[in-house]
């Protein structure tokens, strides 16, 4: 946690985080242009934020996209704030958020992308199996993800209530065990509306006995879906982490995954 406080102590790094909060997934060049900052200086500040876990870098071809990761700040909130005068703080936050809502009404719209990072004490092989084994996904997700996980193959998100109903379908785009899985995530063919499927990338990066799992959900059709999955993915991945580290899932209802992003 010392690295987080050190990173946040610098006003330039806080400004970088503010710019990523306003528009997540920016390249180094975009950040420099918005802040009128030299690339070398911005790179040094971003490296500090990455080491502190406040920024996540996702590679897309030759580009390096930077995403705000609020997990360390959430841990600070849980440790020192969550049990202290929460009703008063929530009231203040509600007033501030209403003011921000009005201020952001005229903000330019972009295609939403969601990125979530978690660290799991397990091997890359164990994480890969948890992502692709139907029985394991049924335990921590509440649905069985069924496929042979070969590029070009379909995958299905099947209910475990005995009905065999499928809520979400997609196609495997890339599969590089045990480090990278890319799938489409789409409505069923008989859905009332048709739209381009979104894309989910699972990146598994091992380091000694810990794995860094980054989930990137791209090509989201609208902000409503981004808000929906921003509640769903943390729940699913917390259950996955708990299952691999303790052998059991968390005492909560599994997330009902849908392409509309509703919990």
Image (spheres, rainbow, N blue to C red):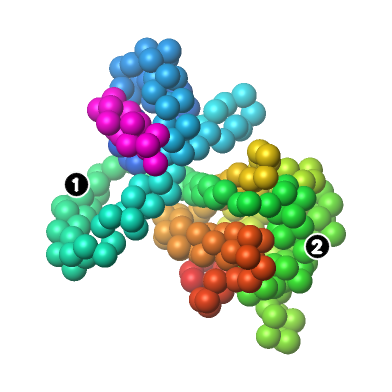
Splitting the image into 4 quarters, where does residue 130 fall? bottom right
Task: Say which of 214 and 5 sits in front.
Answer: 5
Q: Give the residue number, with chain letter if any, for mark 2.
A: 147
Query: Does 152 sit left or right of 259 as displayed?
Result: right
* 208 up-or-down from 219: above or below: above
Among numbered discs 2 and 1, the one appearing first in the sequence? 1
Q: Few, some or many C-alpha atoms within 10 Å of disc 1 (few <14, some 14-19, many ≥20)? A: few
- Which residue appears at 67% of the width and 68% of the height? 247
Q: Position of residue 179 (x, y in %)?
A: 73, 43
x%, y% of residue 250? 55, 71
> Which span of residues is magenta-colored?
1-15
Does the segment drawn in magenta span residue 32? no
Q: Position of residue 219 (x, y in %)?
A: 55, 48
Residue drawn at (70%, 80%) of the image: 160
**Is the residue 76 above or below the residue 256 in the image?**
above
Residue 86, position as x, y percentages in the image: 21, 65
Q: Residue at x 35, y 31 (%)?
A: 7
Q: Is residue 235 left or right of residue 155?
A: left
Q: Quadrant of the N terminus?
A: top left
Label 2–label 1 contact, CB within 8 A: no
Whether 10 is among the magenta residues is yes
Q: Which residue is mark 1?
A: 103
């Amino acid at each position: 946690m010392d690295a987080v406080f050190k990173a946040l102590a610098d006003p330039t790094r806080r400004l970088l985080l503010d710019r990523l909060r306003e528009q997540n997934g920016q390249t180094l060049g975009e950040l420099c242009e918005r802040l009128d900052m030299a690339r070398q200086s911005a790179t040094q500040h971003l490296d500090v934020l990455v080491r502190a876990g406040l920024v996540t870098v996702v590679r897309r071809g030759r580009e390096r996209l930077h995403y705000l990761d609020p997990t360390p700040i959430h841990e600070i909130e849980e440790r020192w704030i969550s049990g202290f005068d929460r009703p008063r703080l929530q009231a203040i936050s509600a007033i501030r958020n209403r003011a921000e809502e009005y201020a952001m009404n005229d903000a330019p719209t972009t295609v939403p992308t969601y990125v979530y990072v978690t660290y799991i004490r397990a091997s890359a092989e164990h994480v890969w199996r948890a992502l692709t084994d139907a029985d394991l996904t049924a335990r921590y997700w509440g649905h069985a993800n069924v496929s042979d996980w070969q590029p070009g193959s379909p995958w299905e998100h099947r209910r475990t209530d005995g009905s065999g109903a499928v809520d979400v379908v997609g196609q495997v785009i890339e599969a590089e065990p045990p480090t990278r899985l890319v799938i489409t995530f789409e409505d069923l063919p008989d859905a009332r509306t048709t739209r381009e499927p979104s894309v989910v990338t699972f990146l598994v990066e091992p380091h000694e006995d810990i794995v860094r799992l980054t989930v990137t959900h791209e090509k989201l059709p609208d902000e409503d879906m981004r808000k929906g999955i921003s509640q769903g993915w943390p729940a699913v991945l917390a259950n996955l982490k708990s299952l691999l580290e303790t052998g059991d899932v968390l005492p909560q209802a599994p997330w009902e995954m849908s392409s509309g992003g509703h919990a």
